Image: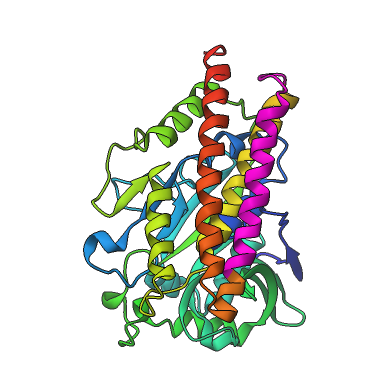
Amino acid sequence: MRNLKEIVRLTQTDPILSTYAPDCMLLSSILKEETAIDWMLNHYVQIVGYNFAADGYEYLAPIFISTPYFCPDTPIYRINIWDICPFIHKYSINREMMYRNFSSFTDFAIEFLDKGYYLIFHINREFIGRGSFMHICYATGYDRINKKMYVSDHFDNNQYTNIAVNFDDINNAFSELIPNQRNEKDDYDNMTEFEGKIFLVKTRKFNYKFEYSLLHLYIDDYLNSKNSITGFAPKKEVYGLRCYDVLDDYLKSLIANNVETSKDPRIFTFFRDHKKVMRMRYEYLINNRRVEDQTEHINLFYENEKKSQQSLMLFIKYMNNKDTNNIVKIKKTYNEIKDNEIRALHNLQNQLQKLL
């Protein structure tokens, strides 16, 4: 065996986004590269909402995510952001194959972390004292002296953080995985394809050039609630501005004090992140002299970011005191956010048209 370093800590930076672990994993790894922010702002425009009420599950809160999808392993009909990211190489190996070549997960992880690879894998978080459920995890380093592995996920108060875990604990969390939370025997037949894989991710240098035609397409799709990237939209999915309709229906359900409706603050952290990136993108275009510095429209983006943060705080208050007046305020605020966004994005589209 070749000589391995005693301690490895791969670089992680502020991921900018905060809601979903896969987005945090990817962005925290690549944003150290000089033009990675250009690539990020060229994407993360379009959003998709999963309206479970359309399938008869009215009690489930909707889910909103960016598209291309954040999962590193997706069905053939869906594009994921990892596969189109030019700043990484991504490979995968299944668990069974890993165990044929290594005696433990940590032996395998150390071998590849030493070579500069981050690892994405599923664990049973009960074994690391962070809840009792299965979730993906991101290995970013190790300490062979103290027998610790550094891993990232939303560990502390739903904040994306990096923690040190004992080798024995991470090995148990990896090997005693609850397959899809079904409490069945841990064997490969009971795992989904995604659960059974370990992903190896290595960053690379790349000089990204901002594609204004791509941004124009994303914004057009967003404003017209369509999906030109794949052209595929299951019944329960809505795109772009129609996501506000799904959000509005959800808020109406909460105002009606429907106790069966689940409460999910990630909805509001997601929209807060989305408005933050909208503002950053417009500033980027101004700073690169691609659009005019129009005070009226940059103020709309700033206002939406501020309002989305206020709405998140109101939702947290609602979860604590159950006062539906907070939801009424959020509903009104998001109507204003939508109107602001339509005005600002139509103006941006008109300016981008001149660059095509």
Pick the front one: 84 or 246: 246
Q: Residue at x 32, y 38 (%)?
A: 230
Choose top left, top right, bottom left or bottom right for residue 341. Answer: top right
Q: Nearer the viewer, residue 57 or 125?
A: 57
Q: State left or right for residue 239 relative to residue 284.
A: left
Which secondary structure dominates the residues rendered in magenta? helix
Q: Quadrant of the N terminus?
A: bottom right
Is 297 magenta? The answer is: yes
The residue at the point 51 percent across, 71 percent down is 324
The percent position of residue 12, horizontal first and vertical second, equals: 71, 57
Q: State the image coordinates of residue 220 (x, y, percent, origin top left).
A: 43, 29
Q: Does residue 335 appear anywhere in the picture? A: yes
State which region is magenta: 289-315
Measured as percent of width and height from the top left, residue 155 is found at 62, 75
61 or 165, which is in the foreground? 61
In this view of the protein, can residue 36 be seen by the observer? no
Q: In this rendering, is residue 264 above or below 176?
A: above
Figure label count: 0
Relative to 20, say whether 69 is above or below: above
* Residue under the point 65% across and 47% down: 305
**Vertical placement of residue 200 versus 254, above or below:** above
Where residue 43 appears, as percent x and y from the top left, is 53, 38
Colour treatment of the image: rainbow
Please tell me whether residue 219 belongs to the stretch shown in magenta. no
